[in-house]
Amino acid sequence: MKKVVLLVLLSLLLVLPARAQSIAEQEAGILGAQTLTEGLDEEALERLGGLSPTAPADFAASLCQILADALHDIRLPLREAAKTCGMLLAATLLCSLCAQLEPSLSAQAVRLGGALALTAICAGGLRSMIGLAAGTLDRIGTFVTFLLPVLSAALSASGGMTSAAALYAGSMLFIDVLMRLIRSLLIPLTYAFTALSAAECAVGGETLQRLRELTGWIIQTALKGVMYVFTAYLTATGLIAGSADAAAVKAAGSALSTAVPVVGSILSGAAGTVLAGADIVRNYAGVFGLLAILATGLAPFCRIGVHYLALKLTAAVGGTMQCGGLGGLLSNLSAAMGYMLAMTGCAALMALLSTCWFMKAVRL
């Protein structure tokens, strides 16, 4: 009787390698992969077109669709940007004509009126883009709080326990630092940069110029510094923790095969099947996460980018006019919009890099 029971158990173990996909489906439920859709808003879910975090996806086709939707949605922002830039050029041209046709007007008065006009025209668009960037950061941050725990659990279940802990802790820390830094410091500094630019154009003075340059330098350095440190952390973690996990899994498999007589290799194969199922879950969730981050952040990035490029073009055209320093103000206003573009891009890029490193970690 004992031999019959042992034979049945061995038969069950032998069929486990053929059930990796079924095991992957069960592990997806255990690891909570199906909850990833709860971290997305309706717009992002619509852009994903019904993709599931627990099923394979055509990454190239989905990416093309998300990109096409993002480009389709920039038509209205493009018209708004063109309208704003037309008003900015008209105001700049009017100031230039006033300075040339009315010699009685002082250059200081022309600069003051022009600075007030350009800032007032651009303020609405800049405030709208700052609100869009802040909302995008919140949506990305919310989704990341759903995505990274799932990827971390799947990576741990597939044998990368050291990598999972290090990547999860570092990614959540840096993403949280970046989000807090942008909302509490860099966005207010962008407003300050705009105000200093307007004051510099209207009043002049080396002090205002230095303050504006310092404000811009702080914004740029903060973004670059966080991204550099984050990238270095991911690289070091991947090299150290990944090697340790690979060695540990190999040693565990070898020990299991030799420690248990007769059935050790069978148990090792069954364990490998379970680990492979977790790896499948990680791949599915990772691909879904990449597409979801793009679906959340790509469209706002394109909208802000349209306004930035339009302002850059306006600054280039306005710089050719004899407008008493208004061309410099237009250039600074485009730089402020560029800072918002950089903040949105950095947040999305950090989330994408984290997801890629979770997918790149030890594979079994």
Image (cartoon, grey):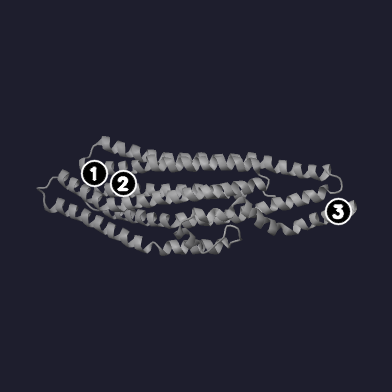
**Can residue 13 be seen?**
yes
Please name the amino acid that badge 2 sits on: Asn
Q: Identify the residue at image location x=33%, y=39%.
A: 213
Residue 298 x, y percent position in the rendering:
45, 56
Residue 348 x, y percent position in the rendering:
47, 50
* Above or below for 158 versus 62: above
Residue 84 x, y percent position in the rendering:
28, 57
Label 3 environment density (alpha carbons within 10 Å; few <14, some 14–19, many ≥20): few
Q: Identify the residue at image location x=31%, y=60%.
A: 80
Residue 72 x, y percent position in the rendering:
41, 65
Q: What element carries label 3?
A: helix
Q: In this view, does 91 lie to the left or right of 31?
A: left
Please name the amino acid that badge 1 sits on: Cys
| Whole-number angstrom distance, CA of label 3 to CA of label 2 | 80 Å
Disc 1 to disc 2: CB gap under 8 Å: yes
Label 2 environment density (alpha carbons within 10 Å; few <14, some 14–19, many ≥20): many
* Above or below for 151 versus 169: below
Q: On the image, numbered disc 2 is attached to which residue?
A: 332
Q: In this view, does 323 lie to the left or right of 152?
A: left
| Whole-number angstrom distance, CA of label 1 to CA of label 3 | 89 Å
Labelled disc at residue 5: 3
**Can residue 289 be seen?**
no
Q: On the image, numbered disc 1 is attached to which residue?
A: 201
| Whole-number angstrom distance, CA of label 1 to CA of label 2 | 10 Å
* Above or below for 188 versus 28: above
Disc 3 to disc 2: CB gap under 8 Å: no
